[in-house]
Image (tube, rainbow, N blue to C red):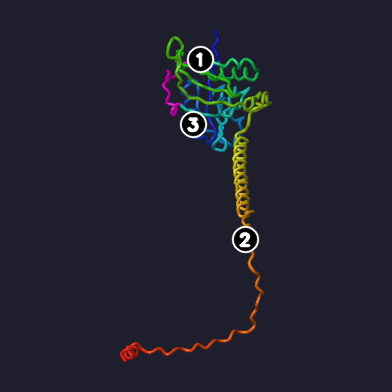
């Protein structure tokens, strides 16, 4: 038989990613034996350059992590060099190191891919399903892979997002234990080309993280304003209550009108009165007079 074209996937990122993204990339490379790594790409470079990098590395699939503002992470999944490609916002990342889950699987073993039934109901999800199948499933007879199947990648659609989980199959009856990592993909756009080209689908429910943060800030500001208004209203109520207390209607019942005295204005200074001092005898003289 003819040899199948070798499928390799390039997993790398832009500069400015945080430690969690770095760990996630490492976890994905560990999970996928057909993955290759490359140095981080400068953010000044155009994304079309990635197609050349894939060609040099002999890869026909690519997972590219793009960091923005050191807090938002975008993931491109592309079929290089002809497309299609999809751009996602990555949310709720939990890497293998931080999850501490009990699941474990053989390194290099091949995964089963489990998809939500919703993937077959809409055309853009069907396209993504095909992209995921070609990217995440380890090719058969790949030199670095093991011929065993002991774990499952699940792709579930909930809340208009795609939830990725990795489980170990522990028993023959198919009971599962989560291994990790886990992350959520929020679809932005699907492009016809690889890292560009005409837009095939744009998610109407997608809100950019900047918009989300702005809405949060506005909501917080509105809350503060509301609190201030409530305070001012309470202050106004208190002062009006005080005024009511001060003006007592029954207070002037017991007031007796005082007699009006004519206002007598003195124009001259009063005369000084001369007080004659009574000559008081000393104590000794008083005693002598008493003896007499």
User: SS of the residue at dot 3?
Assistant: helix
User: SS of the residue at dot 2?
Assistant: loop
Q: Which mark is residue 22?
A: 3
Between the residue at mark 2 and the residue at mark 1, the CA separation in whole angstroms equals 98 Å
Q: Decide: few, some or many residues near mark 3? Use Cα within 10 Å; few <14, some 14-19, many ≥20.
A: some
Residue situated furthest left in the rendering: 291
Q: Position of residue 47 (x, y in %)?
A: 61, 31
Residue situated furthest right in the rendering: 198
Q: Which mark is residue 112?
A: 1
Q: Position of residue 184 (x, y in %)?
A: 55, 26
Residue situated furthest top in the rendering: 1
Q: Is residue 244 above or below residue 4?
A: below
Residue situated furthest front in the rendering: 292
Residue 133: quadrant of the picture: top right
260 lies left or right of 177: right
Residue at numbered disc 2: 255
* Residue numbers of the magenta segment: 96-111
Q: Position of residue 68 (x, y in %)?
A: 57, 36
Between circles 2 and 1, the one closer to the viewer is 2
Disc with the residue nearer the chain's start (1 vs 3): 3
Q: Quadrant of the N terminus?
A: top right
**Is any atom of residue 157 visible in this view?**
yes
């Amino acid at each position: 038989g003819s040899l199948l074209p070798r499928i390799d996937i390039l997993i790398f990122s832009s500069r400015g990613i945080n430690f969690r993204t770095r760990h996630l990339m490492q976890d994905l490379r560990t999970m996928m034996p057909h993955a290759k790594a490359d140095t981080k790409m400068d953010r000044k470079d155009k994304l079309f350059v990635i197609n050349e990098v894939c060609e040099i590395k002999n890869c026909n699939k690519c997972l590219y992590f793009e960091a923005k503002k050191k807090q938002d992470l975008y993931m491109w999944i592309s079929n290089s060099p002809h497309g299609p490609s999809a751009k996602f916002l990555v949310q709720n990342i939990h890497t293998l190191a931080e999850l501490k889950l009990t699941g474990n699987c053989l390194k290099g073993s091949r995964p089963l891919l489990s998809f939500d039934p919703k993937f077959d109901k809409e055309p853009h999800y069907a396209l993504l399903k095909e992209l995921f199948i070609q990217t995440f499933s380890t090719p058969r007879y790949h030199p670095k892979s093991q011929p065993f199947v002991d774990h499952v990648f699940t792709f579930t659609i909930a809340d208009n997002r795609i939830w990725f989980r990795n489980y170990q199959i522990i028993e023959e009856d198919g009971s599962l234990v989560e291994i990790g990592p886990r992350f959520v993909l929020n679809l932005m756009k699907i492009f016809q080309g690889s890292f560009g080209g005409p837009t095939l689908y744009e998610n109407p429910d997608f809100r950019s993280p900047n918009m989300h943060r702005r809405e949060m800030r506005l909501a917080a500001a509105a809350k503060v304003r509301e609190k201030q208004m409530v305070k001012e209203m309470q202050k106004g109520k208190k002062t009006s209550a005080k005024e009511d207390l001060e003006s007592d209607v029954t207070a002037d019942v017991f007031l007796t009108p005082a007699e009006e005295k004519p206002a007598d204005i003195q124009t001259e200074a009063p005369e000084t009165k001369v007080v004659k001092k009574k000559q008081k005898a000393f104590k000794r003289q008083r005693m002598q007079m008493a003896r007499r």
